[in-house]
Image (cartoon, grey):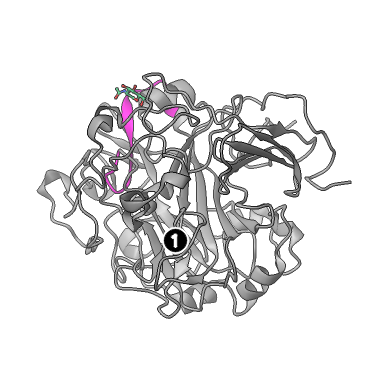
Amino acid sequence: MQPAVALVTGLAALSSVADAFWRLPCRGTSGLARIDPLIDPGEPSSHAHIVHGSSGFSMSSDASALLAGDCTSCGVRQDKSAYWAPALYFIDEDGDAEMVDEVGGLLAYYLLYGEGVEAFPEGFRMIAGDPFIRSFDWPIPDPPKSEWTGAQASQKALAQKALGFNCLNYAETPEPSLGRHFLPNKTFLDEHCTDGVRFELMFPSCWNGKDTDAEDHKSHMAYPSLVMDGTCPEGYETRVVSLFFETIWNTYAFKDRNGYFALSNGDPTGFGYHGDFMHGWESGVLEQAVKQCTNPSGMVEDCPVFELQTEIEQLLCNFDMPDILKSEDLKKCKGGLPNDILVEWGPEYAFPIKYANGKQPTSAKGVPDSSASAEPIIDLGSLAGHVMVETSASSSSSSTSSTPTWTPTPVTSYVEGAVTQQVVYVEQEIVVLVDGQGNPLGTQTGGLETVSTSYSTTTEVVETVVTIPTAPPKKHHGHKRHGHGHVH
Ligand SMILES: *[C@@H]1O[C@H](CO)[C@@H](O)[C@H](O)[C@H]1NC(C)=O
C-alpha cells in the first residue's frame, strides 16, 4: 500500500455558489533558479524562484517563448503560462540555508468572480506582492469585511491582505484562506503546523482594459474592494480572471533543528511574499475555458475544453538552465540564502537589496513599487501592542488574546472518495455548507447581520509523489457520499 499522503487544497469558492472556478494543478516544478524574466530580463535575478509551467521559461522569455516550449509542468497541455514565486528556506544555527520542500507543486486557481469576467489578453503579465515589504501594521485577524473602508480599503492594504500563510494540521479544523498575512515563526510552526504551511497569493483581478503590462508590472491592475471580490476601482473596471496561487511547504521536517525560515528574497516575515504570472495559454483556449469551465467542482477533469496530461508528464517537464546558473546549488547553500541576499527583519522597507560579505549586486534592478514605504497604513493607537497576536476569527477587531486560537466555526461535510471534506466559511455570521459540487446543503446563522462575502476551504486527498508526516482528517458525522465529489 502507498503511504497515506494528503495534499490539502485551500480555496474553493465563492461569494455565491454560482461563482465558477477551476483549479489547475502544476504537480511539477519546471525549475528552481535565479531567473525572473519580468524583473531582470536577460540576466540572473537577485533571488531564487520556484517556477511552474512552460519549459520555454528563461531569463528572457516572453509569451511567444513560453508558447514555443514543448511541455508544461501543469495539468493542462494548452497552458504554457509561467507561474513563479520565491522559494522558502530554513536557515540553521550556523547560518547555512536549505530549501524547504514544496509539497505537491503549485495549484493555480482560476476563479471566475464578478460580472462579465474576461480572459487575460494575449501578452498579459503581472506581479502580486512586493518583495521588499517587511511590515503590515494591522489588527490581527482582519476586521470584518463590512468594516473595510478608508485606509483599510486602500490598494496597499488590499495587496497585503492578498497574502496568506495557512498553518496546516490535517487533524484539526482548517484555517480560512487568507486568514493570516504573515509567516508564523518557527516555534509556532513546530507546535501547530504538523503538515506544514500553505502559502496563498491572490492576484489583482481589476484591469485597466488596455495595458497588458506596466513598468512595475502592477499598475495596469488593481484589487477589487474585498481582495477576492467586491467592486473594482475607477479606471480598472474590466474584470479578468482572479488568479490565486497555493503552495505547501514542509516546514515540519525541520522541527528538531534550531533556526528560522526565510523567503529567498531575504524575508523572514512573509510580508514580502510575491508571485509572478506570464500568460501563455494557446490562443483562444482561455477565452473558451472562461465561458465553458463552469462546473462548480473546480476540477479540470470536468471541463471539456482542457487537454489533460498525467502527473508524471507534469513532473518530467523542465526548462533549460542557462550556463551562467548551472553551477548554482539552490537547495543547500553554505553561509546563507542564494546569491548572498541578506535577511532583513524590518520593519523598514528592504530596498535597496543588501548582500552579505559586502558583495555588490550582480543584477537586481528590482524596481521597488513607488507607492510602497515602511509607513504604517493606519495608526493603530491602542491596538499597537497586539499586532502579532492572533485572536479568534469570530472576535471583533479590537479584542485580542494572548493565546493563539483560530476558530472559524465551520460546518464540515465528508465524502467517501477523493474529496473528503469541504468547508465554507462565510465571515462569522453565517456558515454555508456545500457539497462537492458547490450546491448549498444548509446554513447556520449567528443572528448577526449577513455579510455576503466568504472564505472557503476545501480539503482534498489526492495522490502525490511526496510524502509528508500527516494524520488523516478526523471523521465527523456528516453528509456521506461515494465518488469524487459527484452527486449520485
Ligand atoms: C512566535 O509566535 C508566537 C505566536 O505569534 C508568539 O507568541 C511567540 O512569542 C513567538 N516566539 C518568538 C520566539 O518570537
Rendered residue at 35%/68% (across/down): 217
**49 over 38 or under it: above or below:** above
Q: Position of residue 183 (x, y in %)?
A: 37, 37
* Residue occupying the far right of the picture: 488
Instruction: Let me know if residue 384 appears in the view.
Output: yes
Rendered residue at 19%/60% (across/down): 362
Q: Amino acid at mark 1?
A: Pro
Viewer-proximal residue among 161 and 271 = 161
- Residue 441 magenta-drawn? no
Residue interval drawn in magenta: 253-268
- Residue 262 magenta-drawn? yes
Q: Position of residue 318 (x, y in %)?
A: 51, 60
Q: Secondary structure at mark 1?
A: loop
* Residue occupying the far left of the picture: 358
**124 over 364 or under it: above or below:** below
Q: Position of residue 39 (x, y in %)?
A: 31, 65
Viewer-proximal residue among 241 and 148 = 148
Please tell me in which quarter of the rendered image ligand 1 is found: top left
Q: Position of residue 110 (x, y in %)?
A: 58, 60
